[in-house]
Amino acid sequence: MKKALKILAIIVGIVLIPVIGGISYFYVAFNNYSLEDNYLLDENNLSYYNDTYDEARNDFRLKSAELAMKYPGIKNFNLHVENKKDTNLTIDFCFIPGSDDDGKILILSSGVHGVEGFVGSAVQLFLMNNYINDEFLSKTSVLLIHGVNPYGFKYGRRVTENNVDVNRNSDINKELYQTINEGYPRVYDLINQKGKVKTRSLGNRFFFLKAIRSIVKESMPVFRQAVLQGQYKFPEGLFYGGNNFEPQIKDLVPIIDTICNPYKTVFALDLHTAYGERGKLHLFPSPVKESVKKRMETIFEGSQINWGGSDDFYTITGDFVSYIGKINNDKIFIPMTFEYGTMDSQTTVGSIKSLHVMVLENQVEQYGYESDIDLEKVKNDFIEMNYPSSDEWRSHIIDETKILFEKSLKRFCELEFQ
């Protein structure tokens, strides 16, 4: 009997030790998650960044006005966005017509996910400072759309005041809001926690266990698609796409349509942060025809485009860059989303940590928080995920953008599209 018990104890130990070790590893990795940057720092790159919406908007307007002094044909204007909380929220535009009136136009948009606008604004200022010149404008026109979601930009949220994710709300047809995300109800309880946030609760410290269980049950690709696709059923939930056009989505249609009307080719780049390997500029295309795919591969030759088929790929509904394409459905349309990674979310721990940060931020907005310490941690973690405070990261992002712009913008200008 003693021998049997001893053997049983050994077997239990063999089983439990790896399990306990794995849980301990994830516990430490998850609750002490941090990333270091060892990129070269160029102080000049930091000059493009601002830490408030008002400062970013002001710099964009000042640079737009400066360009207008050099190029009289420029049109600088803004669109007031309806909001119950703040009457001074605008989307700002700088339209710079090139000399080829019916040829090509480049559209560069920022702040669709409001809090991501800090980096998007910096990239737009970088373009304005370094690429808007006579040679460039002889081959293309440029439309800059600054702060598509100004509420989220100003108040540090991805979403609008209605909790609507603009990158799941953008379409010209209301049928979008009837879309059913069949997988979302299966992950609802995990990503939409109820009650006041207490960051150090056991449930939050062991959130990774619940997430891993769901991932194992669904598989990572299915889990990721269910979470990130977008949903139109739960207004309080993450990735809510709304039940109607957000005000700017309705009002942007005639603006984009009128400006793009004379052009045959539209190259649309939408700027985002957070998803993917930290410090890397990821290229995420919308679903396109084979002919468009070939054009994109030519423009971005030498750069990796995530066409799908990998575990970290997902598709979304109601995205902004596809919306621009629907407005320009009679033209040669070339879309691309730039995603600047911050959290190494291509890894399991990074992906779960990123999701948890978003879960807590939404929970704070919906149900409140236990203490000011909890609120501060949730808000700081959320900003850090979308707009890292690291000067090395910020500088490197401009370097990454420069490398891609040097190649892709030149190719776009030189190519003849049929």
Image (tube, helix red, strand yellow):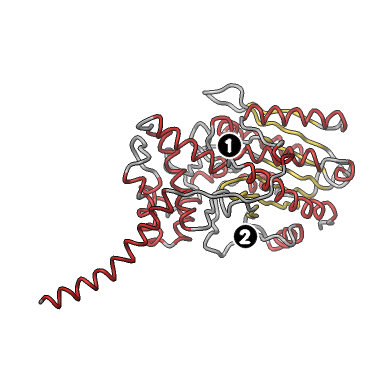
**x and y percentages locating residue 126 in the rendered image:** 75, 40
- The foreground one among 179 and 404 is 404
- Crowding at dot 2, Cα within 10 Å, few <14 / some 14-19 / many 20+, comes out as some
Q: Is residue 49 above or below residue 268?
A: above
Tag 1 near tag 2, CB within 8 Å? no
Picture residue at 62% right of the left edge, 38% below the top: 117
Three-letter residue code for mark 2: Asn
Q: Secondary structure at mark 2?
A: loop
> What residue lies at 44% left-to-right and 36% top-to-bottom?
377
Q: Farthest residue in the left direction?
A: 1
Instruction: Describe residue 95's horizontal placement relative to residue 379 as left or right.
Output: right
What amino acid is found at the position of numbered circle 1 in the picture? Gly
Screen quadrant of the N terminus? bottom left
Q: Which residue is mark 1?
A: 114
Residue placed at 83% from the left, 56% from the top?
A: 415
Counting residues from the start of the chain, the first of labels 1 and 2 encountered is 1
Q: Above or below — where is 86 with respect to 186?
A: above
Cα separation, mark 1 vs mark 2, equals 24 Å
Q: Is residue 206 above or below residue 49?
A: below
Say the numbered circle drawn on residue 55.
Answer: none
Rate crowding at label 1 as few (under 14), some (14 to 19) or many (20 or more) other CA atoms within 10 Å. many
Q: Judging from the image, what secondary structure is the residue with disc 1 in?
A: helix
Check disc 2 and report the residue beneath it: 306
Residue 205 % position (x, y): 36, 47
Q: Position of residue 132 (x, y in %)?
A: 82, 40
Residue 61: quadrant of the picture: top right
Query: 393 or 177: which is nearer to us?
Result: 393
Count the marks: 2
Q: Residue 238, located in which quarter of the rendered image?
A: top left
Between 37 and 194, the one lying in front of the other is 37
Left or right placement of residue 143 versus residue 69 in this view:
left
At a point 59% along the width and 50% down the height, the residue shown is 341
